[in-house]
Amino acid sequence: MKFKINPFIILVGICLIANIILSYLFKFERMIMLDMAFHLFKIISKENFAIQNWRFGAAITQFVPLLGTKMNLSLSSISTLYSISFSILYFLIYLILVLLKSERYILLLFLYLFTMTTHSFFWPISEIHQGSVILILYLALLDFYKFDFKSIPLILATIVFLPTIIFLYPLLIFAVVSIFIYFFFVKREKNGIVFIGTVIFICIFSKLNFFSSSYDNYSMTKAFNIENYLIFYSLKSTKMFMDHTFANYYLWLGSFLIMILVFIKKMNFRPLLFLLGYSFGIFLVINVSYPEGGEPFYLEGQYMQLNLFSSFIAISEFKRIEKSAISLFVVIIFFAFFMLRVFDISNQYTNRVDVCNGLIKSNNGKKIIIKETDKIKKDLKMTWGSSFETWLLSTIKTGKSSSIMITYNPDKYKVDLDKNHAWITEWETIDYEKLNPKYFVFKDTGRYELK
């Protein structure tokens, strides 16, 4: 039996290629962005992976800039490759799904990547995205092998993928557990569930007891603020989520409401209860963990878990949706609105680059530490990455590395101001001689100034 390529599959591929092009066009907006610049600094300076908090799955995309460093490519080339590496990962997973003839999960991949994505496009480094797309690939493999755990490839995929997903981001545990509970109670799928459940339990137990980190522990602790659960409706984070939902997440909201109506009309209450229960639960966990809200580029990836689960329920419950004419309509409309959202808010991130450029030009030849002001914080959103951002931008643009840092506590660094052959960053002061001169072109040997 020949496999006929559904036109929507080709269209999804075109969208993913367009996403790679967008990642290139906005390479500075994506790279001159906090963790992106910091991780690139760590990879290049150590010539090794920059794995933090045991999130070893991040090595998948970090391999690209690491290889570029080993090949002695220019900083500009390495930076560009890192920017597009995330979009290339999504495209590679798409190609695997095509080989698996998994049209449903191609649709799920598309819906996850483009239904809600707005600000997070400019901060692709969050491991929650990498974990989510690997989860989609794993679900497609389960579907391909029909949950037949006599298959060695499926056993290996389970042993490799589930730990990778769970370790990549704590919030992904909710999606993983909920999806397999759904398979058991709604789809009555029992093959391999015990094995899968055992692997999930071992992963969670190991993560909490042997591979915990202070960062993840703190994040999880915030979710146990019982008082905030009782007043969730009045939290600032709840208001901010609603504002962003109407401004940017409207396609998810519309799809979510349509699904509810369809399930009620068909009296299909089991998936409805899973949809509502998971969505409300994740909504509460995120908003209670960040009661004062946060930068949209940071929280958006977490809110996208709402879309991941609702889209999974949709492809599971609405038979042959991927083969219907509506799939073409969804791909065209959803990607068009994704493009509109990205271009609409891109000026915020272009402005960040312009601010860093301005600092570099106005302080040419100077080593300075600038006290954070409300205006600078508003323009840059966060300032802890300023030393890495200005290093990266100045070296690419001028061939010379700038020594500029913005901080709320300049006095903290007074002890290092006279180290004229060193670079002061947020967490450490590094001697020039310890840095690769190809990528760290520090020529200023004067004293740091406080501003």
Image: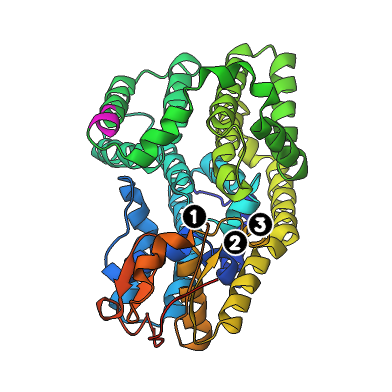
Nearer to us in this view, 12 or 346: 346
* Label 2 environment density (alpha carbons within 10 Å; few <14, some 14–19, many ≥20): many
- The amino acid type of the residue labelled 3 equals Asp
| Secondary element at tag 3 | helix
Which residue position holds label 3?
374
Nearer to us in this view, 334 or 228: 228
Q: Which residues are magenta?
A: 205-209
Q: Residue visible at 56% across and 22% down?
A: 281
Q: Earlier in the sequence, mark 2 or mark 3?
A: 2
**Image quadrant in which you'd find residue 219:** top left
* Label 1 environment density (alpha carbons within 10 Å; few <14, some 14–19, many ≥20): many
| Secondary element at tag 1 | helix
* Label 3 environment density (alpha carbons within 10 Å; few <14, some 14–19, many ≥20): few
- Location of the C terminus by quadrant is bottom right
Left or right, residue 267 beside residue 313: right
Q: Earlier in the sequence, mark 2 or mark 1?
A: 2
Residue 233, numbered circle: none
Nearer to us in this view, 429 or 164: 429
Left or right, residue 5 beside residue 224: right
Residue 242: image location, x then y, percent: 73, 34
Closer to us: mark 2 or mark 3?
3
Q: Is residue 412 visible?
A: yes
Q: Residue visible at 75% across and 57% down?
A: 340
**Image quadrant in which you'd find residue 422:** bottom left
Q: Is residue 425 visible?
A: no
Q: Main secondary structure of the magenta part?
A: helix
Residue 229: image location, x then y, percent: 58, 19
* Residue 135 highlighted magenta (yes or no): no
Nearer to us in this view, 384 or 440: 384
